[in-house]
Amino acid sequence: MNRAHPEITCERRHVEWPVEIRSVEERQDTRTLVGYAAVFDRPALIGSGALRFRERVARGAFAKTIQEADVRLLVNHDPNHVLARTTNGTLRLSEDEVGLRVEADLDLADHEAALWARRIERGVVNQMSFAFDVIREDWDLEADPPERTLLEVRLWDVSVVTFPAYVDTVASVRMDDRVRRVLESRGVVPSDVSEELAPEDTPWQAPSLSDFTDQPWDELSDAEKRRIAGHFAWAPEMPPERYTDLKLPHHRPEDGAVVWRGVAAAMAALFGARGGVDIPAADRRRVYEHLARHYRQFDREPPEFKEASWFPAPRAGEEPPEEAVRARLLRLRLEALERKLGIWR
């Protein structure tokens, strides 16, 4: 049974690669389109904010689908505009050292096919795209941003496109719920609410919800919750379910300016000062990089990143492990720095 074109559920990608129109010597009424709908091992940034990730297509990802699927060559992924099709031999798909190679015979007796052939010849249209479902994939959630490798996909169509489904670093990608769930399984390092820096000697005190708004958290819009989250270095999800989920504030509530003493307090807490902060180990590096960038904005050298590793107190008569001693010394130094900066509470 033929399945309807998945207008909503499938994902789409485009590739910056020349598309050519070639003459067919033995057939004057035909032009052959030659191009690539996908390129192997070329990383692309997709999405934005918490849903931003880097993606590449592995070699062999199309090997099975091009043997089995009934794939069409469309215009702008519109199933009402079919230029060629694999089942009648006018569309030929293959994998080579570059990527997913597309060859399609365009019948010049067909007004629409002739029109698009001329547009491609003149360079008016010069990009291709493919629509797909994922069969197998691999995620590296420790990377920043997360990295996704497409290992095997099911093709729905390849298309010539006037406007790509996304442009490299822009966030207009079609994303299914499965991808969203994978990305949201990690915590979120919110985008800064402001890049402005407060004077370095600005006092700091961790803000409460009333410093941002008079309304209860549950009555705020998602946009307002995201705005408030931008004053912090970590949230378990976006928008946060509760204000108390937000960790490591360092922006001034009234105008969003970055406060140096808030940044230093957040970094100290990340490394265990005052009992540390409840953030998953997988997210600590990203939070550290976020805060380290602010250090540099204030012309300060950030401390070296090291995973927090707290050990239990030794038993009577035992020497504490060397790492535990170092960790406690680091905590004492960070607490001393807080007192010196006037942010110890």
Image (cartoon, helix red, strand yellow):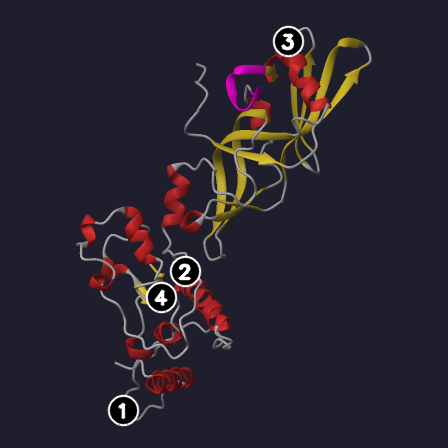
Under circle 3, the secondary element is helix
Q: Nearer the N terminus, badge 4 or badge 1? A: 4
Instruction: Estimate the spatial distance between the alpha carbons at disc 1 and disc 2, rounded to whole Å.
Output: 51 Å
Q: Nearer the N terminus, badge 2 or badge 4? A: 2
Q: Nearer the N terminus, badge 1 or badge 2? A: 2
Q: Which mark is residue 251?
A: 4
Q: Nearer the N terminus, badge 3 or badge 4? A: 3
The picture quadrant where one finds residue 209 is: bottom left
Would you name the residue on which mark 2 appears?
194
Mark in front: 3 vs 2: 2
Instruction: Estimate the spatial distance between the alpha carbons at disc 4 and disc 1, rounded to whole Å.
Output: 45 Å
Residue type, mark 1 in image: Ala
Would you name the residue on which mark 3 appears?
111
Residue type, mark 4 in image: His
Q: Nearer the N terminus, badge 1 or badge 3? A: 3
Mark in front: 1 vs 2: 2
Q: Is residue 336 left or right of residue 46?
A: left
Q: Look at the image and say whether residue 81 sits in the magenta stretch.
A: yes
